[in-house]
Image: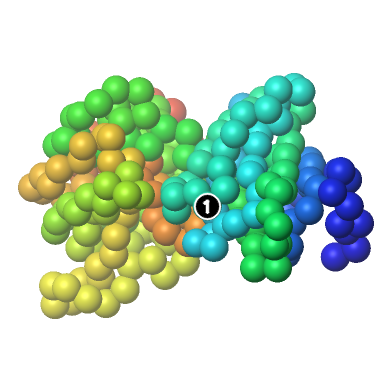
Amino acid sequence: SGLSQEAGSVEQLSLHCAEGSLEWLYPTGALRLRLAPRLPPSTTAVKGRSPQHVTACIKPSGTFRGAQLYLEREGVLELLLPEAPRPRVRCFSWLPREKVALFLQATPHPDISRRIAAFRYELRGDWLARPALPAASLAGEGACRPCNDTEILMAICTSDFVIRGSIRSVSNNAELQESVISVSTARIHRQKFPLFQVGGWPGRLAGSIRTPLRCGVKPGPGTFLFTGWLHFGEAWLSCAPRYRDFQRIYEGARRTRQNPCEFPMD
């Protein structure tokens, strides 16, 4: 509210919340959104750990019209969302000392009355930095490689969810470039929100976990320890070792007193 709505105007705003949404009715001119989140501690389980970078993700509404969204990094603009974008999430990261902003520029139209530029955003430290795959799938490199021992131990301490269970099926969504892993749980060690609920096998909870389609995840037998983050209300995979491999890694770290947090074993 309170925008001048002049064609050449640029309104300056700051996004301090770690997550939220923006809705720009009848866009005219431009908005410059400075990213300055008041981030909570990256973890309460591992003291003294500060984020090495900050990650932001943008999810356009299905009716995003009337503007284009750019990332402004050190004065250079990069197009994130064209007008009428596909419903895909765009993520980017920056170092805490870097200056970044979002530049939302209205596109000229004779009639702006039906146009609304709206999106949701999330800002977090060290968030979704390297989603990985179960050892059964071993596909891809970089973001798709399996977690190493250190990453697995950190994941059980800091993740939004830690679920022991098995893979029921995997479905692929080419439009969203996502794979959806259907999981049947044997034990819920942690979940910040009720992502896994009654359904599927008798006496077990079931839910879905997402991962990038390019990783080529495939179903594998056995029990896994699924860890990951909430991303616009959905579960996204971080590390998922086989449970017997996790037991070996954790016991070894505990013997040498290198486990970053305590985890219930049975």
Q: Residues within 10 Å of mark 1 (few under 14, many from 20)?
A: some
Colouring convention used in this rendered image of the protein: rainbow
Vertical order, 189 against 237 (above or below): below
Foreground of the two, 64 or 256: 64
- Identify which amino acid the numbered label 1 is placed on: Ala
Foreground of the two, 174 or 66: 66
Residue 198 location (% of width, % of height) = 27, 77
Residue 80 location (% of width, % of height) = 57, 38
* Lateral position of residue 11 relative to residue 106, left or right: right
Instruction: Give the quadrant of the N terminus.
Output: bottom right
Q: Can you see residue 253?
A: no
The residue most toward the front is 110
Vertical order, 211 against 165 (above or below): above
- Residue pointed to by mark 1: 84
Q: Residue at x 29, y 22 (%)?
A: 141
- Which image quadrant is residue 19 in? bottom right
Q: Residue at x 71, y 40 (%)?
A: 102
* Lateral position of residue 50 relative to residue 165, left or right: right
Q: Residue at x 42, y 32 (%)?
A: 130
Residue 136 location (% of width, % of height) = 14, 37
Q: Secondary structure beneath disc 1?
A: loop
Foreground of the two, 36 or 44: 36
Q: Residue at x 38, y 41 (%)?
A: 238
Vertical order, 33 against 97 (above or below): below
Q: Can you see residue 195?
A: yes
